[in-house]
Image: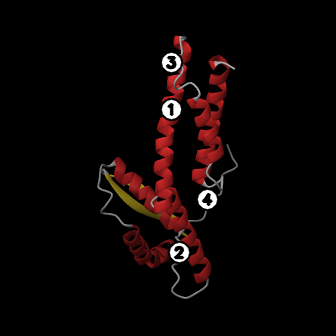
């Protein structure tokens, strides 16, 4: 076989090798694809000391070798980070596992933090968006402050509105975001046109 037949094979195996390394790094493959790497390196080195007279084939070959070389550097760096415990995807998965284990151990125990209130989270996100639109700093508003404020106002609003079902919304008035409260019950739609 000549270089004309080997270049498409080298290119397809290199593409497969890149895919397999990515699968290895995200955890789908359990082992590093060293056998495929050795095959690709052997195929790549076949024409290392052979002069390639066809300019198109020489250009394609040098591009594939450069691509392989840059990926090998990336892979060796990533493998070293994994071995040293500094690989970000591994650290993320480890933190995720720790959180799941803690939640299993602490489920139902007193002192366990309560899950976030979806209503509070919605109002908080709306408030942040409104502050962005008004070019106000976001750091001056915290989720805890908002929760305290809404909790303090809820009893008075319940008396005023005559219901415990209160829905908060954020509006912009006078260039500043304001939190408005209303009855949380959905209004029936009028069936008349």
Q: Disc 2 versus disc 1: distance between alpha carbons?
A: 70 Å
Q: Residue shown at 69%/20% (left/top)?
A: 1
Residue 187 is tagged as 4
Residue in front for this viewpoint, 145 or 36:
36
Q: Name the residue tied to disc 1.
A: 67
Q: Disc 2 versus disc 4: distance between alpha carbons?
A: 15 Å
- Answer few, some or many: residues within 10 Å of disc 1's Cα (few below 14, many 20 plus, some between 14 and 19): few
Q: Name the residue tied to disc 3.
A: 59
Whether residue 129 is visible to the viewer of this picture, yes or no, is yes
Q: Name the residue tied to disc 2.
A: 162
Q: Residue shown at 62%/47% (left/top)?
A: 34
Q: Is residue 65 above or below residue 163?
A: above
Q: Is residue 54 above or below residue 133?
A: above
Task: Return the x and y of residue 150 as percentages of the image width and height.
Answer: 43, 72
Q: Secondary structure at mark 4?
A: loop
Which quadrant is the C terminus positioned in?
Answer: top right
């Amino acid at each position: 076989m000549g270089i004309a037949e080997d270049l498409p094979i080298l290119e397809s195996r290199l593409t497969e090798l890149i895919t397999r390394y990515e699968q290895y790094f995200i955890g789908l493959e359990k082992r590093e694809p060293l056998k495929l790497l050795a095959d690709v390196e052997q195929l790549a080195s076949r024409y290392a000391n052979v002069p390639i007279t066809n300019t198109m084939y020489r250009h394609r070959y040098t591009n594939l070798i450069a691509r392989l070389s840059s990926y090998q550097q990336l892979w060796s760096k990533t493998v070293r980070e994994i071995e040293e415990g500094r690989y970000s995807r591994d650290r993320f998965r480890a933190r995720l596992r720790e959180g799941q284990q803690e939640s299993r151990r602490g489920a139902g125990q007193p002192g366990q933090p309560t899950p976030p209130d979806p209503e509070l989270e919605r109002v908080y996100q709306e408030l942040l968006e409104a502050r962005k639109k008004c070019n106000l700093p976001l750091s001056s508003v915290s989720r805890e402050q908002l929760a305290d404020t809404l909790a303090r106002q809820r009893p008075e609003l319940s008396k005023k509105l005559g219901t415990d079902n209160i829905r908060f919304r954020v509006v912009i008035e006078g260039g500043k975001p304001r939190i408005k409260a209303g009855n949380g019950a959905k209004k029936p739609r009028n069936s008349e046109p």
